[in-house]
Structure formats: structure tokens, C-alpha cells
Image: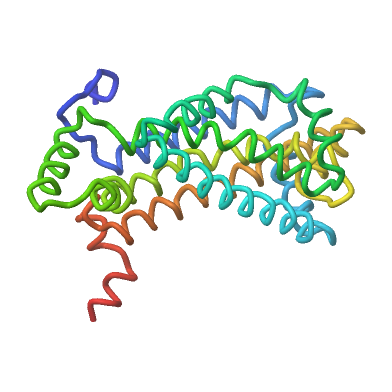
Amino acid sequence: MKKLFFPQFLEKTPFKIILLMSIVQAVLFLTFAQFNSNELIPKPTGVLSSALKTMAAPGFLDNFVATLGLILKSMSISIVVSLFFVYLSLVPAFKGITIFISKLRFLTYTGLIFVFTILVHNGSQIKMSLLLFGVIPYFVTTLLAYIYDPNDKSFQKEYELCYTLKFNRWQTLYEVVIKGRLHLVLEVIRQNFAIAWMMITSVEGICMSEGGLGTMMLKSNKYMKMDDVFAVLLIILMVGILFDYIFDLLKVWLFPYTNTKRANKLLINRLLSK
């Protein structure tokens, strides 16, 4: 029992113990929050009740679909654009452009919202542009760190193999970087998907005519309905965790060599093997 409260390096803690500790910590936190609520931070029971009412409301499904569609569309465009510039960065003449894009993550929306509003007149395009501008620099930064690492020994071995097989440079790019690092792309998508969910409420608040979960939350916040505000936050959190789990399963299913044990346990692999 004492080992649970000391750093562990090579030892592996059983999943059941981690799950049990997480449940105990969650119960303690919820109990503390239940008896220490105020006007700004509602009780967990009130948030849960409000979340159930929100999901049962007539317009919830339309708002949820609007938000989900916007996020999926923006993420699809972001990953395609980001991969294009990251792969292009291996060409020395264009590497500076990719590095510059990665540095744009330090910019804020404060001075750029007005610029996007003037340049793009359609509300839907404004939201899409802001999401793309916010997500792409993070995608590019993470992809640069994951996909191309010349100090990685496995990368060096793969490159030497292509050189031995007399592949040209474009063939080597495809085999080693594009095809050979495809599983890392899915991992980057999983990690950065949270950025879109974090930004969606502020982006949807700029143009509220098309609805969305962010619009629902901002309207509730305007009238100080904190139960409803935290209810929408809870829904976004649950959906985000679900997508995180889905992307993790997709990585194991599509690229079983990343985790052979988990891949063998997947239901879909068992069905296909039969």
C-alpha cells in the first residue's frame, strides 16, 4: 500500500488499483464540492440534474450537431493543411514557412477577431477561420516533434534501409516519414482534438445565429444560470473523453504493432479473426 504514494519507474501498477484510487479521489472531490458550493460554483447534483434536462431539451440535438459538425470539419481541414506544411518542411527551401506557422500559436484572438470579421463576412466562415487559425499552429508544432526526429535510431535505420534499396528522396519521404509515421499522426490528432473543444465556446459566441453548445452556454452565463453553464461544460467534457477513447482504439486497431496485447483483445479483431 505504501508503494502507491512513492514514485515508481520500472514497476507496473495494476489497472484495478489505479481505478480504485481514481474512484476514491472522485468521491472525495464530489463530496467536498457538494458541501462547499456557492452562487458561482453549483452543487454536483444540481449540475447533473441540469445536464439531463439540457440533453432532453428540444433544441439540444440541433445545437450539438452544429458544434460537432463544426469541430469535425475544422479538424479535418487542419490536419490536411498541417501535414502538407510538415512534409514540405523536409525540403529546406520551405522549412522556414513551417517554423513560422508553428510560432503563430503565441498570437491571441483579441486583435484578430476584427480582422477576420472584416475579411470574412459569413458567420460560419468566421468561426471556421478562427478555429483553423487556432488549431493549425498547434498541429504543426506537435507533428514536427513527432514525425521527423533525425536523432531517433529507428528513423536512422529506416532511412539507411531505403538508401540501401536505392530509393530516391521522394520515395524515402513516402516510406519513412509519411507511411512509416502514420500512427503518430493519429496520436497527434488525439492529443490536439481537445484544443478545438476548448476553443469552440468562445468561437461560437462570436456568431450565435447558427447555434451550438457554446451559444447555449453563453446564453445561460448571461442570465447567471450557473447550473446550466456547468451542465454544458460537463457535456463537452464527456464528449471529449469519448472521442479521446475512440481515437485511442482506432490507433490500436489500425496500427496493431503499437500495442499488440490491446490489439488482440479488441472485439472487432476477434470477430475478423473468426
* Residue drawn at 33 percent across, 61 percent down: 254
Q: Is residue 64 left or right of residue 18?
A: right
Does 272 appear above or below 146? Answer: below
Q: Nearer the viewer, residue 79 or 256?
A: 79
Does 30 appear above or below 19? Answer: above
| Count of numbered circles on the image | 0
Q: Nearer the viewer, residue 72 or 266?
A: 72
* Residue drawn at 39 percent across, 42 percent down: 87
Does 250 appear above or below 159? Answer: below
Q: Position of residue 167 (x, y in %)?
A: 17, 52
* Residue drawn at 52 percent across, 32 percent down: 138
Q: Position of residue 232 (x, y in %)?
A: 73, 43
Residue found at the very far right of the displayed protein? 223
> In which image quadrant can residue 115 be found?
top right
Q: Position of residue 149 (x, y in %)?
A: 27, 31
- Name the image colouring: rainbow
Q: Nearer the viewer, residue 36 or 113?
A: 113
Q: Is residue 4 left or right of residue 218?
A: left
Q: Nearer the viewer, residue 77 or 192?
A: 77
Residue found at the very far left of the displayed protein? 164
Give the position of the N terminus as an image quadrant: top left
Give the position of the C terminus as an image quadrant: bottom left
Q: Position of residue 200 (x, y in %)?
A: 70, 40
* Residue drawn at 82 percent across, 43 percent down: 215
